[in-house]
Amino acid sequence: MRIVFMGTPEFSVPVLQALVDAGHDIAAVYCQPPRPAGRGKKTRPSPVQVCAEKTGLPVRHPVSLKTAEAQAEFAALNADVAVVVAYGLILPEPVLNAPRFGCLNIHASLLPRWRGAAPIHRAIMAGDRETGVCIMQMETGLDTGPVLIRESTVIGADDTTGTLHDRLSHMGAALIIRALDQLSDLTPVPQPAECVTYAAKIDKAEARLDWNRPASMVDRHIRGLSPFPGAWCEINGERVKVLTSRLAEGQGAPGEVLDDRLRVACATGAVQLLSLQRAGKAAQDAEDLLRGWQVPKGTRLSEV
């Protein structure tokens, strides 16, 4: 099929590569413009742009698709379908209607649960037992379109947003290839009106750990915000990111370190902190971090 691909971050790259490997004709790749990044704030192209240029695909990064000129340029590509995954711009109705089969979105949740910007983070933080990928026929509403095909995966007790992100990205790549192969045989299924939830963008203000919550919530909070933006607390007066954890036994005052291995009490139960990152340093296993930094039993971590 003749396809316009629209995506920007690392999550989108396996999908683009799968479309290329499957032999589809990629008419153009749309992504966000290069932006300043890193400590030096040097302008960097997005992961999708890097992948597209390596593959020799034409890249476009309009600031908006709302202008008549941008819409005419899109329509002139005469695409059979547009494949959209984490693109970052709203698609106006003329763009949605331009391809012969419309625009298909790869969404990282089991719609209608977790419509919106941060479905992977929110699924883990909410304690969902499973999530998945939906291929959705796009319409003007926010992730409201009918679903063509879906696949689920269990959220494990040690899954983080990072591990789930990678798994769902590759699931989405395989699923869109199936959907395109079967497109004429798939029946779009409208999303039910009930059970709708919204995955609001993660606010950095949410990242501070609250030890006054039950251990299960603290553990999910840590894993749901790992690796970005990273849940954090203060240890010995220093702000430290906590990247992975697991539930543990123990009782104490909320935020109290219960042993010499960073087992920390919560409102009920405890969590074992497994990997952490001090400011300006690489992430470390708790065992390695404690070799050069004393956090003795009885230390109280930051409270809110």
Image (cartoon, rainbow, N blue to C red):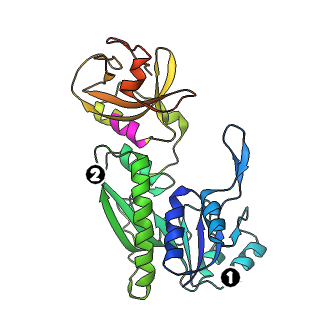
Q: Quadrant of the C terminus?
A: top left
Report the front residue among 85 and 296.
296
**What x and y, as percent, mark residue 259?**
28, 17
The residue where tag 2 is placed is 129
Disc ID at residue 77: 1
| Residue at x 66%, y 77% (from the top left corner) | 94
Most extreme residue toward the bottom is 184
Report the front residue among 282 and 72.
282
Of the residues shown, which amino acid type is indicated by label 2?
Answer: Arg
From the image, give the main secondary structure of the stretch colored magenta. Answer: helix
**What x and y, as percent, mark residue 99?**
60, 82
- Judge the density around disc 2: few (<14), some (14-19), many (≥20) Cα neighbours within 10 Å: few
Q: Is residue 153 left or right of residue 224?
A: left
| Residue at x 39%, y 65% (from the top left corner) | 171
**What x and y, as percent, mark residue 216?**
29, 35
Residue 80 quadrant: bottom right
Label 1 vs 2, first from the N-terminus: 1
| Residue at x 73%, y 65% (from the top left corner) | 62
- Judge the density around disc 1: few (<14), some (14-19), many (≥20) Cα neighbours within 10 Å: some
Q: Secondary structure at mark 1?
A: loop
Q: Quadrant of the N terminus?
A: bottom right
Measure the C-alpha gap from mark 1 to mark 2. Answer: 42 Å
Residue contact at pointers 1 and 2, CB within 8 angstroms: no
Of the residues shown, which amino acid type is indicated by label 1?
Answer: Leu
In this picture, which residue range is highlighted in magenta?
219-224
Disc ID at residue 179: none
